[in-house]
Image: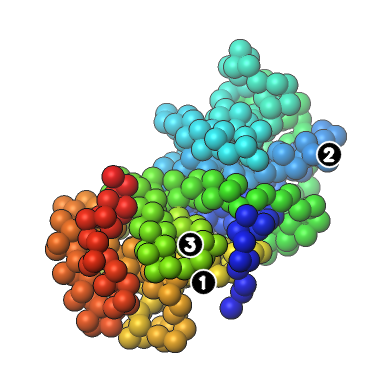
Amino acid sequence: MGHTQENPAALEIDLGQAIYALTDALDLVGVDEVGHGKRVGFMAMACAEALGYQGDALRKLFHAALLHDCGVSSSRVHRHLVEEMEWDNADEHCRIGYERLNTFAPLAMLAPVIRYHHRHWDTLAGEGLSEEDALFSNLIFLVDRVDALTSSHYGKDLLMACQAIRERIAGYRGTMFAPELVDAFMQVSAAEAFWLSLESPHLERFLFNMEREQLPLLIDFEELKQLARIFAQIVDAKSHFTVEHSDGVASLARYLAEKKGLPEARCEMIEVAGLLHDLGKLRVPDEILDKPAPMSEAERAIMLRHSFESYQILRRIHGLDEVALWAAYHHEMPVGKGYPFHASAAQIGIEARIIAVADVFQALAQDRPYRKGLPYPRIVEMLQELAGEGHLDREVVAMVASEPERCWQRATLL
């Protein structure tokens, strides 16, 4: 098991690692169509280098490209973005992405670039962007549309399709895309290596090298909590039935940890784990989360992936080893019949047990497609039944039962 520092105020996280983790989370929104942001990042870098960009400017562009779709949570919206050249409501996710990043100081410089990454070049004037931000925004738009045109050809007939794609992009020179950007794209995309680099595992090798070569950009624990809330917003926005779920779980888990008498540092990290526990749900299609009926066996099999996906995303951020494990274990059971690891009682620490109880409480308190939110006396009864069956920790459930109304207020953010 990894180690969490006893003083979270002294904890420093590499922002670059966090950006890559967020990119992995955004990848899940595509369900089976993954890697969009990473391919956009690679292509944007290639074009910008041809234009002579380097250093901090190049890194800024790369990070903006990786995160350009941070306003997308819905698999339905994602399908529009990767299957259609233009889409009427595309500006909405640009606005949402802008608002999310603009509130987080370490990434706020990316927000203007993301705000206009679906805006035609010939309409960008007058938006108040710097010359660099306007070019970067339009470049992300260009390569984003290249990926949409190319998505059905990866692993199949990519080199046969690329010339037609190049010609189509060239046709938008000076209207949809800036002339110098189209020229740069035509230059770099003339090489077969450009296209082949977009396919896995070549793309993963490029990203591995980029992550290894970049200098650490450290953020403190308070900034990590702000970033965790951005992650949570993306997850909770996936369905109107899950709005504020992560915040509610984090709030209740923090309260129960304090009530248990855990050290302040532990309580802080449990709150972060509560915010991040459901990242993997981004890979669950909207139709399943919004289904007004019990899940089928096949749909449940898809849902069983989500806590493992959360673990895989979070474990890549050095310093969050235990947070990753607590998030991964939020569906494990003391009786040993949980998922995805079938962990034994001895393997499940009090932190994960607290998050598990907070998760069930909050879910029962909230409206869902197939039922209304339940009153807290009924929630307590159900939690006690689950604890009696070994599905939840008895001691944590007893803490909830001792102050059910207060727990309900924390879970529902009232």
Q: Which residue is mark 2?
A: 54
Q: Callout 1: 10 Å neighbours few (<14), some, many (20+)? A: many
Q: Residue at 23% across / 83% down in the picture?
A: 389
**What secondary structure is marked by label 2?**
loop
* Amino acid at circle 1: Leu
* Amino acid at circle 2: Gln
The answer for how far apart the CA atoms under marks 1 and 3 are is 15 Å
The label number, if any, that marks residue 325 in the structure image: 1
Q: Which residue is mark 3?
A: 267
Q: Callout 2: 10 Å neighbours few (<14), some, many (20+)? A: some
Quarter in which the N terminus is drawn: bottom right
Left/right of residue 235 with respect to residue 102 in the rendered view: left
Image quarter for residue 344? bottom left
Q: Is disc 1 in contact with disc 3, using a CB cutoff of under 8 Å?
A: no
| Eye-nearest disc, 2 or 1 | 1
Q: Is residue 239 visible?
A: no
* Amino acid at circle 3: Cys
| Eye-nearest disc, 1 or 3 | 3
**What secondary structure is marked by label 3?**
helix
Q: Earlier in the sequence, mark 3 or mark 2?
A: 2
Q: Residue at 27% across / 51% down in the picture?
A: 409
Q: Residue at 58% across / 48% down in the picture?
A: 222
**What secondary structure is marked by label 1?**
helix
Residue 198 vertical position relative to residue 55 in the rendered view, above or below: below
Left/right of residue 145 with respect to residue 32 in the rendered view: right
Tell which of 17 and 257 is nearer to you: 257
